[in-house]
Amino acid sequence: MITGRHLLVDGKNILYRAIFATNDSPIDVFFRMLVSNMNRAEADYCHVFWDCPRNETWRRKMVPTYKATRDDKAKDPSIGEMIGICHQALYEAIPLLGMYQYKVKELEADDLIYSFVSTYHPVETVILSSDSDLI
């Protein structure tokens, strides 16, 4: 059984928010958000969950129009490129900071967060995401 309080982070969701938050580096904003929320939640551990590529999700395979109604910002290729570059840098840096991260074929971060909470219940968790799928 694991102990302590765990901050569970929807990585791509928070990265997307960090890109539009300010003119600062999205990576810097991402880590400031993590540290701020770890402190606020008094978390002992941080877990970052990443989406698999959008076109490979199990939901997209079942319903091809899944998330097809996204706003124009989400479809902007320059935003996708920035997310890809930042994701790669974060994916390499997060384990070096003693944080955990997860990415699984065909699953989105909200699926992985649900699995974590279901598996480790009743461990204390705080979830950082604004993704409505998670709800």
Image: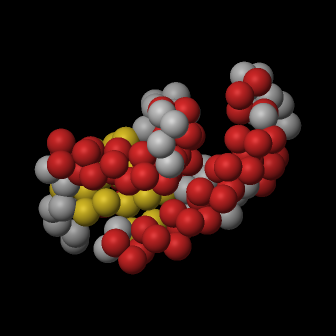
As drawn, is 88 to the left or to the right of 73?
left
Q: Give the quarter of the image for residue 60.
A: top right
Task: Write the residue at 34% across / 48% down.
Answer: 32
Residue found at the far front of this picture: 23
Q: Is residue 116 above or below residue 76?
A: below
Q: Which of 34 and 126 is in front in this view?
A: 34
Figure quadrant of residue 87: bottom right
Viewer-side residue, 124 vs 100: 100
- Residue 10 location, x and y as percent? 47, 47
Residue 16 falls left or right of residue 115 = right
Q: How is the image coloured?
A: secondary structure
* Residue at image location 56% in from the left, 66% down from the top: 89
Judge whether residue 10 can be spotted in this image.
no
Tell me, yes or no, if residue 4 can be seen here. Answer: yes
Describe residue 59's horizontal placement relative to residue 42 as left or right.
right
Residue at (31, 60) in percent of width and height: 46
Q: Give left or right: position of 97 versus 134.
A: left
